[in-house]
């Protein structure tokens, strides 16, 4: 099995090393194509106005001056001689739940793999304020290989990717696996942090306040992580809302 690994945290990220360890449990045919620099939050963006710079780090390890989506395209269409059998994106430093999936470069890389018809899985390791500097990478490393095998044994539908989030706890403290829906974060936690530079000119950070997600909906990815369970969420490329489409057709057709 040929595996293409990428991420959005960059070629030197600790989570990329974790993902390689996961992949090597599954196969010896591993290719790593990751962004040269941190691309968190770039979503499914493509570099259309700038050239892509490719740098070989070592054998089968490449850095691309571009987005995670660029990396998947470069890896699958240019660097690898044959199309990969699996795309693994991550392991992201921090969870990718709820609305995060629309911003996440990690999820977007898996999305691009699905666009290309390749089974694709996004992997993210949650952390808390106390574990921010040292997330529980061993949790993803310990649990991901078996999960990936079981998911692939089912046979992933075309145009579907799988988003996996590992809870903020040690491997032996994981309470189980939950197949979940995409949750909904409390948007009251979203805020604008206004500051002034040394010359008194204003600038701003988009930030999230700290919350316990106690209102996470039952069966959601957020709820699973609160319960120290691994969240497994299948996501479709087709974003069409069919019930509302039917209503629109009644009044617009």
Image (spheres, grey):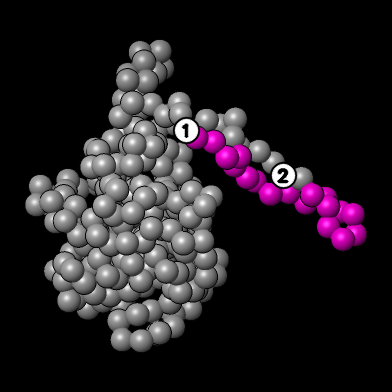
Task: Name the residue tied to disc 2.
Answer: 193
How dense is the environment of label 1, judged by Cα within 10 Å: few (below 14), some, or many (20 and up)? some
* Disc on the earlier residue, 1 or 2: 2
How dense is the environment of label 2, judged by Cα within 10 Å: few (below 14), some, or many (20 and up)? few
Tell me, yes or no, whether the highlighted magenta stretch contains residue 203: yes
Q: Nearer the viewer, residue 152 or 240?
A: 152
Contact between marks 1 and 2 (CB within 8 A): the answer is: no
- Would residue 172 be seen by someone viewing this image from the given angle? yes
* Element carrying mark 1: loop
Image coords of residue 124 (percent x, y): 37, 53
- Which of the 4 quarters of the picture holds residue 239? top left
Tell me, yes or no, whether the highlighted magenta stretch contains residue 55: no
- The residue drawn where x is 19% and y is 52% is 147
Q: In the displayed image of the protein, which residue is found farthest to the right? A: 199
Q: In the displayed image of the protein, which residue is found farthest to the front? A: 172
Which quadrant would the N terminus be assigned to in this image? Answer: bottom left
- Which of the 4 quarters of the picture holds residue 141? bottom left
């Amino acid at each position: 099995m040929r595996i293409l690994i990428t991420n959005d945290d960059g070629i030197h990220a600790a989570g990329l090393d974790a993902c390689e360890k996961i992949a090597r449990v599954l196969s010896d045919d591993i290719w790593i194509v990751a962004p040269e620099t941190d691309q968190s939050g770039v979503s499914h963006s493509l570099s259309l106005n700038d050239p892509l710079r490719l740098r070989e780090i070592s054998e089968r390890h490449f850095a691309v001056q571009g987005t995670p989506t660029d990396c998947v395209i470069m890896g699958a269409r240019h660097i690898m001689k044959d199309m990969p059998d699996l795309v693994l994106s991550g392991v992201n430093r921090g969870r990718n739940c709820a609305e995060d999936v629309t911003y996440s470069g990690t999820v977007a890389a898996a999305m691009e793999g699905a666009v290309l018809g390749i089974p694709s899985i996004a992997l993210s390791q949650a952390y808390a304020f106390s574990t921010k500097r040292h997330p529980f990478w061993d949790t993803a490393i310990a649990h991901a290989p078996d999960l990936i095998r079981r998911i692939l044994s089912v046979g992933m539908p075309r145009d579907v990717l799988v988003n996996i989030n590992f809870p903020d706890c040690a491997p032996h403290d994981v309470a189980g696996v939950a197949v979940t829906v995409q949750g909904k974060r409390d948007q009251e936690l979203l805020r604008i942090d206004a500051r002034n530079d040394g010359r008194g000119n204003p600038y701003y950070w988009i930030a999230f306040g700290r919350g316990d997600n106690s209102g996470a909906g039952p069966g959601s990815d957020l709820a699973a992580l609160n319960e120290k369970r691994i969240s497994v969420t299948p996501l479709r490329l087709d974003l069409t809302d069919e019930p509302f489409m039917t209503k629109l057709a009644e009044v617009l057709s």
